[in-house]
Every structure is written in structure tokens, then in C-alpha cells.
Image (spheres, rainbow, N blue to C red):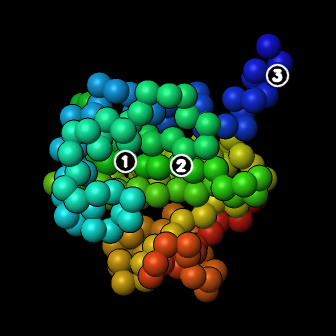
Amino acid sequence: MFFKTLASRYTLANLPVVETERLRIAGLVPADAGAVQAITADPAITGAVDFLPDPFTLDHARRLVGGKKPIKDRFLGVRRKDGVLVGIVGTHLRGDQAVEIGYWMGGAHRGQGLGSEAVSGVLGLLRERFPHRIVVAECRPENTASLGLLRKVGFRDTGDEGHRPGRRIYVIEPS
């Protein structure tokens, strides 16, 4: 049992639910595919997130949600307290040193501070689960809304180019 507990501590499996003032953030499940497709099939999202196809279909949503146990990549659903899915936060282990975070919010839910509330909540969870890793995000410098969110929650610009075209790397160091 010890090794099973230790292994789950260093994976993204079994992440606990995160509750914030207005949100509940938890791993996506297959039943979420329709809601994921509804908020993600927006050219503003598919054009900004490099791995999302356009058009983003229900089959794409099913693959994103997946059925296998997540180890290195985990997508979390961001829900208002009334249960409505408003966004997605992706978490991705990068080697032994870093965990990457990415996010998108459905169009009707932008500009309300829900994105920064969700990212802050997930950051707290990641800092607890992976206290010795840096947290990394990639962002296009011209994406002022996303860049503002990253700065608001404590990321700093490294000046380095990201792995994805046109993006820069932003980090939060371990405490």
C-alpha cells in the first residue's frame, strides 16, 4: 500500500477536488465530453491552444477527457458551484523538475475573474502535491488576457521561447 500511495503522489492521478469561493475544480470524466465540446468548440480557443483541432468535435472531446488513468497529463473541469462547466485547466508533468499548467475558459465565462480563480486554486494543489517542482506555463506575449492572468497569479517571464511556436515561458519557482 505504501508504494501505491507514493506512486499516486508523484502522478496526476487521484488529484483531489479543489474548491474556491465560486468554483469546484475536479478531474474530467467521460460524461463531461458534451460540455467540454460545447465550451471548447470556439475558434478563440482552438486558435489559441495548439493541440486543439478546429472544428473541435464531440469525438475530440471524448479523447481529451479520455478513459485511461492519467499519469503525466490531466485535464480538470472548472465548474461554477451550480455545476455548469465554465473552463478547463490542463496539468502536465514535465520530467522530474516541472509541472506545466494550461487553461481555457468558455466564451460566456471570460472577463469575470473565473480563470485566475481556477488557476490559483490549481496552483495551490500543485504546490502541495509537487513542492519541489517549478510550475511552467507557455503564453503568446500578444495574448494580453492570458498574460495578465499569469502575472496576477504570480508567474514571471523567463525571457525564454516556449516549445510551441510564438510562445514564451513563464514560471513560478518552488517555495
Q: Earlier in the sequence, mark 3 or mark 2?
A: 3
Question: For the residue carrying disc 1, how many other residues have a C-alpha within 10 Å: few (<14), some (14-19), or many (20+)?
Answer: many
Identity of the amino acid at label 3?
Phe
Q: Which residue is mark 3?
A: 3
Residue type, mark 1 in image: Ile
Can residue 145 be seen? yes
Q: Where does residue 52 sit, x and y in percent of width and height?
A: 33, 57
Which quadrant of the structure image shows residue 6? top right
> What separation in Å lies between label 3 and label 1 (alpha carbons)?
30 Å
Q: Which residue is depicted at the point 27% across and 34% down?
A: 33
Residue that carries the numbered disc 2 in the rendered image = 91
| Residue 116 picture location, percent across and down | 41, 58
For the point 71% across and 65% down, the residue is: 173
Query: In percent of the image, x 50 and y 28: which residue is there?
Result: 68
- The alpha-carbon separation of the residues under discs 1 and 2 comes to 10 Å
Q: Name the foreground residue: 32 vs 22.
A: 32
Choose mark 3 or mark 1, whichever is in front. Answer: 3
Disc number for residue 88:
1
Residue 175 against residue 6 in the figure, above or below: below
Instruction: State how many labels appear.
Output: 3
